[in-house]
Each structure stands twice: as structure tokens, then as C-alpha cells.
């Protein structure tokens, strides 16, 4: 694989990887509603005793103007310069099972060359299964457990986890190309897509990585600790519930989403399972605007009370 060294090089743990490990691929930069992929990646690395197997060159793959490195300035001196990473690591789950994690940024350039390299890595390490993930906004309520849709040639996983199937055309992720090539080669692959409430998608939603780690456990057999995420989810849910308490308009919109969600899961025949009887759907802007109006009113009320006291 030396000819591909311009964008890729083996690292310290290259020779230590046993054959037949599962591969998980998590790349940020696109389709990461609720910061689901980022949080999942950070949780796996934090608990995984990571060893770096291979690294990819940001100079070859990254558009620095779109995702700039981070500089640390201390007084009048530049003390640090941190470039985004994309690397392959070997980790261990909570019971010691080894697995491979390809994580970091989604390449901006040279998708076909990047895909060929990952295909070569899959072959070189005799990877047992490849599972990748992203998250998209959907008109679903935060008051219900998050759901997934799934694609790939692992029909058992697709049938077990996917709640939504459709024929759509949408902008591609770099890993869609990898999935396509793996399917062409008849290598086991599955894509897991977390459906995040569209009115929360721009924030950090702990329920997203919780659902994704659960699904990764089903797809790979890995067990990743989630205690920290569960506590963050409890706090997040309490904050959201507090924000919408007393706001009848937001509550009505969420109730509508709940009815649509529950009806869809029961198989209620609808032309659009996420639209109401009139074909109208509350948008992210609708709910976000109501939340903002509520928060603004509460801030004004708190300010007036402070002035009076």
C-alpha cells in the first residue's frame, strides 16, 4: 500500500491488528444532526484504549478554508496549532473486544482515492463487517425514543433496525461511495442513520449517540459505556421540557408530531407518514421560533422581576 502514501501512512499499531475485526467508520462535517456522530466518536475513543493504526494527510484531503485549523495564542505568542485528524485506530470495548474505528473529518477531496484506500484496508485486515453512520433531521418528537433507518447488504440488520424506507435522491456522503463499493465487492456493510428531531438538530442532542451506540452494538456486538451520555441526556431532556412548559403553541406542535410518530409506527396508512391530515407539517423554524419567543418572554419577565427587587 506504499503507493498510496501521499494521503495515507501506517502508524505504530499497524502490525498489531489481528485479522477479522469489525470496522466502524464515523466521519464528521456533513449530516451530523444533533452532533450525533461527533459525540459517538468521542465516547468510543475516550473509553477505547485507542492505538493508532494508520493516519491520513489533511494536506491532501482537507479544505482548510472550510474547516480551519485551531490556533492557540497566549499573549503575544502562538503556542499551538491543531489540525483536524482522520485516522484508523484499534480500540477495545467495555469487555475487551477489539475493533477498528476510522474517525475524523469527511474528506473534502479525492473521494475515489480515499475509498480505494479504505477498501484496501478492509482487505488487508480481513475486516469482518463495516458499519458507518450519520444523522439527519426528521419531523419526529423528542418525547419518543429516537429511531433509525438503515441501508446496506446486511439484511438482518436493515430489517431489525430500519423504520423508514424510501426511494430518494440526496447529496452524498463520502461514505456512500464506500458503501456502494463494498456492496459491489460483496463485503458485509451497513449504514445506520439516526433520525433526530428537526427542531433540535442544530444543537448537541445526547439521545443521538445513545441510540447510535445501541445500534452499533446490534450491528457489531460491541459494548460501549454510555453512563455519561445517559446523565447528559437526562439533563438535556429536563432543560428542553422546562423551555416548552407553559407554551401551548410549542406543546401543540410537539403533540402533533407525537401523534404522527405513533401512527406511523403502528403502520397507519398515510400518504406522508410525517404530515398531518391537511398535509401541513410544523417546520424547524416554526418550533424554533416558538421556543425563542418563549425564552425571550421569560428573559424579559426575569429582568423585570430583578428590576423590581
Image: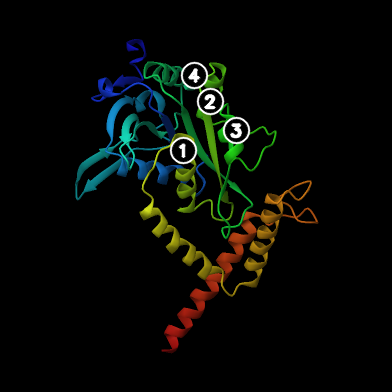
Q: Earlier in the sequence, mark 4 or mark 1?
A: 1
Task: Residue 179: give its label.
Answer: 2
Q: Earlier in the sequence, mark 1 or mark 2?
A: 1
Give the residue displayed 36% in from the left and 48% down from the top. Answer: 225
Q: Earlier in the sequence, mark 4 or mark 3?
A: 4
Of badges 4 and 2, nearer the viewer stands: 2
Q: Picture quarter containing residue 90?
A: top left
Residue farthest to the top, as pictured: 3
Q: Kindly indicate whether the residue at mark 2 contacts the one at mark 1 (C-beta within 8 angstroms).
A: no
Q: Secondary structure at mark 2?
A: helix
Q: Secondary structure at mark 1?
A: loop
Q: Earlier in the sequence, mark 1 or mark 3?
A: 1
Residue 276: give x, y in percent of width and height. Answer: 75, 56
Q: Nearest the camera: 4 or 71?
A: 4
**Label 4 vs label 3: CA separation?**
16 Å
Q: Secondary structure at mark 4?
A: helix
**Label 3 vs label 2: CA separation?**
15 Å
**Label 4 vs label 1: CA separation?**
18 Å
Q: Is residue 205 visible?
A: no
Give the residue at mark 4.
Answer: 112
Give the residue at mark 1.
Answer: 29
Give the residue at mark 3.
Answer: 171
Q: Secondary structure at mark 3?
A: loop
Give the residue displayed 66% in from the left and 69% down from the top. Answer: 249
**Label 4 vs label 2: CA separation?**
12 Å
Of badges 3 and 2, nearer the viewer stands: 2
Left or right side of 194 for 15: left
Amino acid at each position: 500500500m506504499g503507493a498510496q502514501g501521499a494521503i495515507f501512512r501506517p502508524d505504530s499499531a499497524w502490525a498489531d491488528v489481528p485479522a477479522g475485526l469489525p470496522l466502524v467508520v464515523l466521519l464528521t462535517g456533513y449530516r451530523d444532526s444533533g452532533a450525533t456522530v461527533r459525540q459517538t466518536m468521542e465516547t468510543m475513543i475516550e473509553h477505547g484504549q485507542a492505538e493508532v493504526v494508520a493516519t491520513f494527510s489533511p494536506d491532501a484531503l482537507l479544505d482548510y478554508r472550510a474547516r480551519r485549523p485551531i490556533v492557540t495564542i497566549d499573549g503575544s505568542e502562538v503556542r499551538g496549532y491543531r489540525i483536524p485528524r482522520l485516522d484508523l485506530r484499534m480500540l477495545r470495548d467495555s469487555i475487551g473486544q477489539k475493533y477498528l474505528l476510522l474517525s475524523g473529518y469527511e474528506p473534502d477531496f479525492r473521494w475515489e482515492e480515499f475509498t480505494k484506500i479504505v477498501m484496501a484496508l478492509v482487505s488487508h485486515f480481513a475486516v469482518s463487517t463495516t458499519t458507518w453512520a450519520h444523522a439527519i433531521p426528521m419531523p419526529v418528537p423528542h418525547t419518543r425514543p429516537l429511531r433509525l433507518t438503515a441501508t446496506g447488504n446486511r439484511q438482518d440488520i436493515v430489517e431489525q433496525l430500519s423504520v423508514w424506507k424510501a426511494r430518494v435522491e440526496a447529496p452524498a456522503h463520502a461514505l456512500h461511495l464506500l458503501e456502494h463499493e463494498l456492496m459491489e465487492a460483496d463485503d458485509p456493510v451497513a449504514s445506520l442513520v439516526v433520525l433526530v428531531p428537526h427542531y433540535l438538530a442544530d444543537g448537541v442532542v445526547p439521545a443521538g449517540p445513545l441510540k447510535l451506540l445501541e445500534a452499533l452494538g446490534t450491528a457489531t456486538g460491541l459494548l460501549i459505556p454510555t453512563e455519561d451520555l445517559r446523565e447528559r441526556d437526562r439533563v438535556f431532556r429536563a432543560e428542553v421540557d422546562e423551555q416548552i412548559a407553559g407554551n401551548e403553541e410549542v406543546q401543540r406542535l410537539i403533540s402533533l408530531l407525537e401523534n404522527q410518530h405513533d401512527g406511523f409506527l403502528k403502520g397507519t396508512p398515510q400518504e406522508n407518514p410525517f404530515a398531518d391530515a391537511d398535509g401541513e407539517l410544523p417546520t424547524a423554524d416554526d418550533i424554533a421560533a416558538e421556543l425563542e419567543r418563549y425564552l425571550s418572554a421569560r428573559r424579559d419577565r426575569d429582568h423585570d422581576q430583578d428590576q423590581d427587587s
